[in-house]
Amino acid sequence: MIDYRERISELKERRGAVIVAHNYVEGEVQEVADFVGDSLELSLKARELQASVLVFCGVRFMAETAKILSPASVVLHPVPGAGCPMAEMASGESVARYRREHPETVLVAYVNTTAAAKAEVDICCTSANAERIVGGIESGREVMFLPDRNLGANVSRSLGRRLELWPGFCPTHNRIVPETVREMRRQYPGVELLVHPECVPEVVSLADAALSTGGMLRYVRESSARRFLIGTEHGILHRMRKENPGKEFIGLSPVVTCPNMKKLTLDSIVSALETMEPRVELPEPLMERARRPIERMLAVR
Ligand code: SF4
């Protein structure tokens, strides 16, 4: 039987590769990664490292973002079919059409968009900095937030600012319904409840906090509470439990699983490092256009 972990470590050394993984991938994949984080943290890491070979364990738009920020790196995305259904809800063409029809509107794209969509917008944001990015836009300007209507609605409510919302959503977080939250509150009275802002606003309003995955990890580390209910993709429970051995983490519902994040497996990483394929390749002019809104976001930090 192949020892995948050993094989990955050999190949990683031979290729001079760095492996990064999103908080939502399977625990065993997180274990072989050099860095695990949320979208913003991984974008920053890719830009900082400029690694010669970067293996990206996350969904397609994240690997594209890494390539855009580190164009000289060979970026391997072990399972090209691991896409994000929400990112697919805003094609580059439809965003370009919106831009033509609304030339005065500021277009803010959640980083969960394809490179083609990013190339058409003014600025990007992540769930960690969405309020700061939108809050920094001159009041009086109309803003279209895409593609996540839930994150957009949650930001709009926190800032008290009207936003145009693209009709996209994350199928995984959208499955969390208020009834489940109320039922879990009844079962676990007094337990702190954290959700992701990709959840519908009714769910967010029932939670103690709505945070990005990086924000949740900091919150549970710093909180004196011992038990938490977690309303986001279950992959994050692995890291929470590992980093906080004395605390208990309960997933809000078994339906909160992203099938695309689960496509990244140890054998797919071995195969990518053996063959140096599949690589993320994007045309240089497209990367240049898509890089501008990402860099604008990073400048706001
Ligand atoms: S959890 Fe949702 S937003 Fe994240 S990759 Fe999966 S479908 Fe896309």
Image: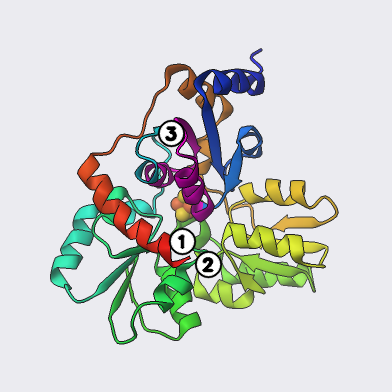
Query: Residue flagged by tag 1: what amino acid is it?
Result: Thr
Q: Position of residue 52 (x, y in %)?
A: 44, 30
Q: CA distance from mark 2 to mark 1?
A: 10 Å
Q: CA distance from mark 3 to mark 1?
A: 21 Å
Which one is in front, 44 or 187?
44
Which one is in front, 15 or 58?
15
Name the residue beneath numbered marker 3. Answer: 77
Question: Which image quadrant is residue 19 in?
Answer: top right
Q: Is residue 124 magenta?
A: no
Which tag is nearer the camera, tag 2 or tag 1?
A: 1
Which residue is found at the position 52% from the left and 24% from the top? 16
The overriding secondary structure of the stretch rendered in magenta is helix
Label drawn at residue 126: 1
Disc 3 is placed on an element classified as: loop
Q: Is residue 272 above or below residue 183?
A: above
Instruction: State yes or no: discs 3 and 1 in contact (Cβ < 8 Å).
Output: no
* Crowd rating for badge 1 (residues with CA inside 10 Å; few <14, some 14–19, many 20+): many
